[in-house]
Image (tube, rainbow, N blue to C red):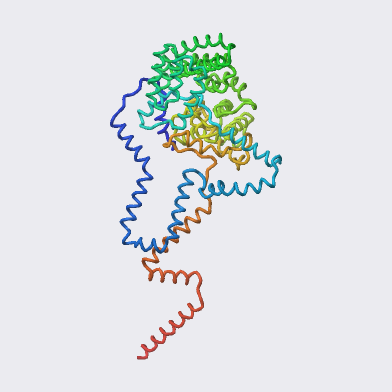
Amino acid sequence: MADRGGLGEAAAAGASPASAPGRNPTLGWRERLRAGLAGTGASLWFVAGLGLLYALRIPLRLCENLAAGTSSLISGLIFIFEWWYFHKHGTSCIEQVSVSHLQPLMGETDSSISEPGSPSRSRESEISRQNLSECKVWRNPLNLFRGAEYRRYTWVTGKEPLTYYDMNLSAQDHQTFFTCDTDFLRPSDTVMQKAWRERNPPARIKAAYQALELNNDCATAYVLLAEEEATTIVDAERLFKQALKAGETIYRQSQQCQHQSPQHEAQLRRDTNVLVYVKRRLAMCARKLGRIREAVKIMRDLMKEFPPLTMLNIHENLLESLLELQAYADVQAVLAKYDDISLPKSAAICYTAALLKTRTVSEKFSPETASRRGLSTAEINAVEAIHRAVEFNPHVPKYLLEMKSLILPPEHILKRGDSEAIAYAFFHLQHWKRIEGALNLLQCTWEGTFRMIPHPLEKGHLFYPYPSCTETADRELLPTFHHVSVYPKKELPLFIHFTAGFCSSTAVIAILTHQFPEIMGIFAKAVLGLWCPQPWASSGIEENTQDLKSEDLGLSSG
């Protein structure tokens, strides 16, 4: 059964542009209590276990057992810690320590054998560069508004949708986009430079108002207020329009002075970033308020006016808006430009391409009919597009098929990771549902991708091998109440299962033997007699049988 709880919460918090709801004290208290109990669940179990051991210390003679079985106790503790570490970090603690401390010592001998210019060295460096680029964190092009959407989610659920790591990355982005070396020339920009570095949201908002007191045309101050203080999309749009008016004036002034000095060129770059950011957020406001054609026009104008700023991935905003308009020919034209082998891929590009090919065959697709007559050329193309998309990001289908609950997308995503899958499915699930049979075809074919890539961490089919660092990065980007999707699934090694069974059975036998030595002795003799019968056992049985017969004869003669 699909879990729609998270999707309902996310939709209630982020989809509607209505006014912010009032906070329900009873609901907030219950949710806070539930969140506190969930957060302290491990601690409560630990305390309960200690209390149980203390209550049973006398009947079980724990002090004597502890003195007699210290090695077993230590082995059990090591196993418990290893199990906990594996489930938390996805790797063995002992293995990680061995790799971290022993491999460098062994690597020195290997390095003396292989020369720096050898092919193995160059191949290792190439793989490391690929992994580094694959695990780069990108800003989410469809990120929500903190005040109007993320904070509303907190009001409704009592949960924090953003992690400290994610917000810290956003703070670094803001400092890169909205500050430059010439901020000291304008007092308002100096105040805003401190505001972007401030961690406390009320302090940032207060600094923005201070900057407006110094300069009523401070565009970055309006940007901060629109992002964090506005509680509705309508309020955010009003503040962004004020930022646009101020930003265009400053941008024209910077254009006139750009060739005077390198400082003026840096100031022009900063003012350009501010103008592009404001226009893009205004387009997103129009999209959320239902003015989709207006949003599409703003995005197209931005892409024509500032083509070098492809790092903002405005084309992904455009794709989503065009899909909402059901302008599939325009979507195909955008894909033809950006779905190129020389450009970086994303889940939005790969899955949108799959959706367009699925749309042509999904309405009449039937697994039974396809198994009888085989797949047509169009169906083969659609299945191959789905396999390509699933290979790029294997986490997306579970969210599209509602096998896993959605949460609000983070402000930063990791390509091919769970965070990117959440960001894509949060906005594009409705487009897949709109096309009849699209989700049915996806459900029938997506798992077939894994047969083509049996070892995804070592070799891919159409893309590079799947990066092994996605789980760690996603755990930093996504909130703790979300169960991070892991690919490929990591199973406990057979050695850990064997060690667990061996340690547990040894501990149980030791305690039972110490408590009930006679019964366990009889049990041990019986087990040994069944598994490995000895000649003395059979002779003893025969002697006992003869004695019984003689006694019976004596009784009968008497």
Q: Nearer the viewer, residue 63 or 447?
A: 63
Q: Where residue 549 appears, x then y in whole percent?
A: 42, 85
Residue sitting at x 64%, y 26%: 342
Where is residue 421? Give x, y as percent.
51, 32
Residue farthest along the bottom direction in this orientation: 558
- Residue 157 sits in quarter: top left
Say if residue 489 shows up in the picture: yes
How many labels, in total?
0
x then y, percent, for residue 33: 32, 37
Answer above or below: position of 347 versus 79. Answer: above
Vertical placement of 329 versus 78: above or below?
above
Q: Say whether residue 371 is left or right of residue 555.
A: right
The residue at the point 59 percent across, 17 percent down is: 307
Relative to the observer, which residue lies in front, 71 or 43?
71
Residue 424 vs residue 552, the one in the foreground: 424
Residue at point 39%, 31% (across, down): 160
Residue lying farthest to the left in this orientation:
26
Q: Which quadrant does the N terminus fall into?
A: top left
Image quadrant in which the C terminus is located:
bottom left
Please state which of residues 123 and 497 is positioned toward the viewer in this rendering.
123
Please say if 62 is above or below 413: below
Give the image location of residue 60, x and y in percent. Answer: 34, 61
Is residue 361 in sight in this rendering? no
